């Protein structure tokens, strides 16, 4: 006996899944997971501010064909809220990535990711204090599980690694980056009505590029060249910037910064998976344990409503 399936069921289900903010958050952190490795690989080849400038200039070129119409239509609103746009430009584009690339000049990707673990906690606390976001005990328990899983992955199951870490000047650059990441996530919840995330992202990128240009003008901006440099810029500009931030911003505007924060702990898990797929590395016990804790934490911290909430409006 066969069961007839409506021809529109699968396309509708797939469309709903792609519009799910949870899927967007998971995809964004996947795309970001390689950024630390790429940034570390490019150390010494380009000034961090220059790298950040070219990264976002390329991202803007990718975004504009999709957001130009909305940018023009929403320009009066964006101009009215220019202060909000400038804050997003600083916290989401100009400050965090320049600081991260500066940190990676002298510190390891491990140190940078360990310090980035502070961002979800700051986002969750900010959402609770400033927005009164309802967070049950299960949410905080899930956060603890995800933190434990992320740390297990980062230190490769060896707690003594944390005690042997040497924090230096490069690690201090991660502190403003962490604060900026948290501020950007919290600001997105205050997006003025009528402004959608695509045009807002493009406007904030334009503002950030203009803010960075005077500093670059004094430093005699150089043009990137070479196959490795151009390939790296293509990845971080197209995937880790334009696509990842569009997915992240749209999802955070929907579910709120507190609910989005734990998804940042997926980044170490993705790093392990990418090593397995791309490099053929064997799966270790600590990876299974750490990955399991991260996923369990996300499940425990999930909203009490339906997990896959469909977006009802285009952003």
Image (spheres, rainbow, N blue to C red):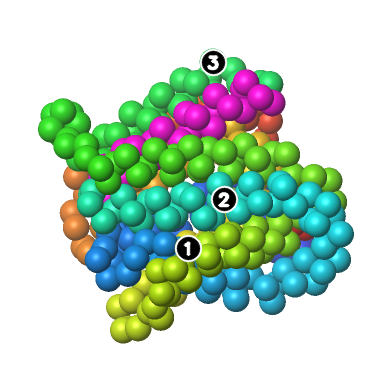
Q: CA distance from mark 3 to mark 1?
A: 46 Å
Q: Secondary structure at mark 3?
A: helix
Q: Residues within 10 Å of mark 2 (few under 14, many from 20)?
A: many
Residue 279 image position (x, y, % from top left): 22, 64
On residue 215, which mark appears? Answer: 1
Instruction: From this view, report whether residue 57 is shown above or below residue 82.
Output: below
What residue lies at 67% left-to-right and 73% top-to-bottom? Answer: 64
Question: What residue occupies the far bottom of the structure in this picture?
Answer: 226
**Mark 1, other Cα within 10 Å: few <14 / some 14–19 / many ≥20:** few
Look at mark 2 in the image and give the residue it sits on: 90
| Residue at the front extreme of this rendering | 218
Name the image quarter holding residue 268: top left
> On the rendered structure, is 235 left or right of 62?
left
**Does the image show residue 57?**
yes
Nearer the N terminus, badge 2 or badge 1?
2
Residue range in magenta is 109-131
Mark 3 is surrounded, within 10 Å at the Cα level, by few (under 14), some (14 to 19) or many (20 or more) other residues, namely few
Q: Nearer the viewer, residue 214 or 76?
A: 214
User: From the viewer's perspective, is the residue at label 3 or at label 1 nearer?
Assistant: 1
Q: Which quadrant of the figure contains the C terminus?
A: bottom right
For the residues bearing labels 2 and 1, Cβ distance under 8 angstroms = no
Residue at left 55%, top 28%? 124
The residue singled out by tag 3 in the image is 137
């Amino acid at each position: 006996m066969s069961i007839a399936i409506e021809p529109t069921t699968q396309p509708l289900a797939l469309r709903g899944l792609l519009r799910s903010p949870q899927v967007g958050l998971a995809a964004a952190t996947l795309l970001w997971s390689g950024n630390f490795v790429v940034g570390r690989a490019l150390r010494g080849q380009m000034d961090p501010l220059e790298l950040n400038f070219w990264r976002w200039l390329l991202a803007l070129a990718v975004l504009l064909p999709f957001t130009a119409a909305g940018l023009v239509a929403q320009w009066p609103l964006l101009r009215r809220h220019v202060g909000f746009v400038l804050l997003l430009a600083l916290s989401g584009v100009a400050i965090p990535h320049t600081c991260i690339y500066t940190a990676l000049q002298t510190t390891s990707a491990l140190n940078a990711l360990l310090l980035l673990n502070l961002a979800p906690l700051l986002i969750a606390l900010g959402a609770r204090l400033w927005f009164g976001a309802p967070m049950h005990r299960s949410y905080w328990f899930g956060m603890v599980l995800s933190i434990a899983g992320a740390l297990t992955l980062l230190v490769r199951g060896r707690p003594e690694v944390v005690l042997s870490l040497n924090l230096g000047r490069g690690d201090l650059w991660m502190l403003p980056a962490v604060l900026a990441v948290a501020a950007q996530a919290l600001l997105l919840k205050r997006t003025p009505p009528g402004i959608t995330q695509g045009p807002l992202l493009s406007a904030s990128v334009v503002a950030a590029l203009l803010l960075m240009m005077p500093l670059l003008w004094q430093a005699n901006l150089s043009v990137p060249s070479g196959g490795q440099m151009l390939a790296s810029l293509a990845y971080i500009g197209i995937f880790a910037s334009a696509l990842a931030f569009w997915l992240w911003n749209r999802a955070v505007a929907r579910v709120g910064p507190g609910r989005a924060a734990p998804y940042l702990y997926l980044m170490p898990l993705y790093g392990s998976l990418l090593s397995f797929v791309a490099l053929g590395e064997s799966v270790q016990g600590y990876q299974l344990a750490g990955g399991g804790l991260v996923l369990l934490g996300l499940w425990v911290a999930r909203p009490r409503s339906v997990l896959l909430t469909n977006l009802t409006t285009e952003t």
